Amino acid sequence: MTERVQFASSSGPRLAGVVDLPEGRTRGWGVFSHGFTLGKDSPAASRISKQLAREGIGMLRFDNLGLGDSEGDWGDGSFSHKVDDTVAAVEFMEASGRPVRLLVGHSFGGAAVIAAAHHVPGVRAIASVAAPYEPGHVEHNYDLLIERILDEGEAPFLVGGKALTLRRHFIEDVRAADLRERIRTLRKALLIMHSPTDNTVGIENASQIFRTARHPRSFVSLEGADHLLTGPLQAKRAARIISAWADPYLD
């Protein structure tokens, strides 16, 4: 069962989301942050959230600015916006009487939930899936455009046949993001999940996150998975692991 919702982003435009409602006894609530340009209906976001809901953990997954069903211009966003909008998603859930204790993020979203966790005191557990150690890792997606963007201020960026606008402030913001310090001072439970055969965000990123983090920290290797968790059983397995790991931190 799902509930379609909308809430205000940190910059004003409304973001569209889906709450995958828990089946059976409600064990807790969480928020999912999707990858770079992927959206709430990407395999990792959709399948992990649905499986967590089957196991009693209701999850809000939402489209970032200008993606999917959300309002606004993707080009106006940045890593900082993604972090702030994750916080806004938690606040929306809290206001509706669903206290969020778990944040889950995939890829770029995995970095975002670690940073966002510092601004949501009620959250007790964070799970990152295939996350980069440095948010600037996303530059490999648009490295051929960087010089033009820095010179001209913006450039069209094609994603799945759709033209988005990538602007200078995004590059500057992602380069300035210091995830290392956010990891080191997290003081909340952290689960790091990564495939050793991830060809998009290498497994060394998980090693760096784990070495930087303090306890309670855990690492699980997602053997055989690709970066996007496109195999249906890959996301389902990840969700089951998150569900079991998160149990002590839920209400």
Image: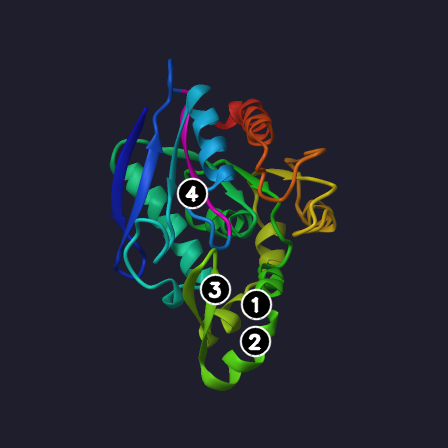
Q: Which residue carries the number 3 mark?
A: 158
Observer able to see residue 90:
yes
Q: What is the quadrant of residue 191 in the picture?
A: top right
Judged from the image, the secondary structure of the residue bearing numbered disc 4 is loop
Taking the magenta stretch, the answer to whether it contains residue 1 is: no
- Report the Cα–Cα distance between label 4 and label 2: 36 Å
Tell whether label 1 touches label 4 (CB within 8 Å).
no
Check the image and name the residue furthest to the front.
161
Q: Callout 1: 10 Å neighbours few (<14), some, many (20+)?
A: few
Using the image as rendered, state which of residue 117 and residue 45 is in the foreground.
Answer: 45
Tell whether label 2 touches label 4 (CB within 8 Å).
no
Judged from the image, the secondary structure of the residue bearing numbered disc 1 is loop
User: Which amino acid is tagged 2?
Assistant: Ile
- Report the Cα–Cα distance between label 2 and label 1: 7 Å
Q: Which residue carries the number 2 mark?
A: 146
Residue 78 lies, with reference to residue 50, above or below; the image says below
Q: Main secondary structure of the magenta part?
A: strand
Which stretch appears magenta?
27-35
Task: Give the foreground label among 3 and 1.
Answer: 3
